[in-house]
Image (tube, grey):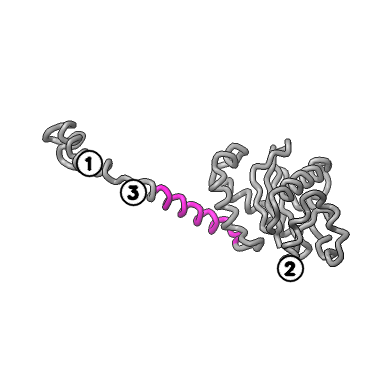
Amino acid sequence: MIHAVLIFNTHGKPRLSKFFTPLPPLVQQSLISQIFSLISDRPAGVCNFLDAPELVFPTPGNATASTTQDKDVRGARDVEGRKEEDDTRVIYRHYATLYFVFVVDGAESELGILDLIQVFVESLDRSFENVCELDLIFHFDEVHHVLSEIIQGGLVLETNINEISACVQAASRNRKASAASVNPLIPSMLAVPGGRGGSRGGSSDGARRFLAAIGV
């Protein structure tokens, strides 16, 4: 299972954080800080995944127990019956000023997750034409949409970049069509006789028709 997908810059500022395992906000912030400290201290030539048993994610049966982890996440490892959580792994890739990080359990393949990160990045590139940090800041809704096409509920749904891009583009077209249909009066009034460029009444006739149409 994929516990979380994170993107942060080289200064540790989160640009995307999606937790598929329910955790309180304070615990999420603590985990993000721990993960950044683990990754930022690693040399450039080392492996792109590492075991991180100190990062405690609750299993579905123990989700309610996570609410007591606010002050000290590390101490939860010593609780009886939590040994199965010690297989947490952090898998990441470094692109320019951004870290793309996946936190997974032992059931996931490290190499498979590295390929999945590449799929995520290439899908973002197609959406934003060479994605950069500013795209993640100003278009966070579309970034989450791309991610939701790939992963939902911690499970991988799609890895075909063409299919992902097609779904994202279709959603973008639908949003634009919906925005254009919010007030259809303005484009329609420009096309009627007497509107702008019309042969009768000029712009004043078109203005009267527009005001009459909106009930003024």
Disc 2/disc 1 C-alpha distance (Å): 60 Å
Work out which quarter of the rendered image holds the N terminus and state it: bottom right
Q: Which residue is mark 3?
A: 181
- Residue 55 image point, x, y percent: 80, 53
Q: How dense is the environment of label 3, judged by Cα within 10 Å: few (below 14), some, or many (20 and up)?
A: few
The picture places residue 14, in percent across and down from the top left corner, at 68, 42
Identify the mark nearer the N-term, 2 or 1.
2
**Disc 2 residue type (three-letter):** Gly
Of residues 63 and 188, which is closer to you in this image?
63
The mark lying in front, picked from 2 and 3, is 2
Q: Is residue 118 left or right of residue 110?
A: left
- The magenta stretch is 158-176
The residue nearer to you, when weighing 64 against 44, is: 64
- Which residue lies at the image location 17% right of the left edge and 31% below the top edge? 204
Whether 70 is drawn above or below 163: the answer is above
Residue 189: give its label.
Answer: 1
Q: Secondary structure at mark 3?
A: loop
- Between residue 39 and residue 131, name the one nearer to us: 39
Name the amino acid type tagged 3. Answer: Ser
Q: Position of residue 108 (x, y in %)?
A: 74, 63
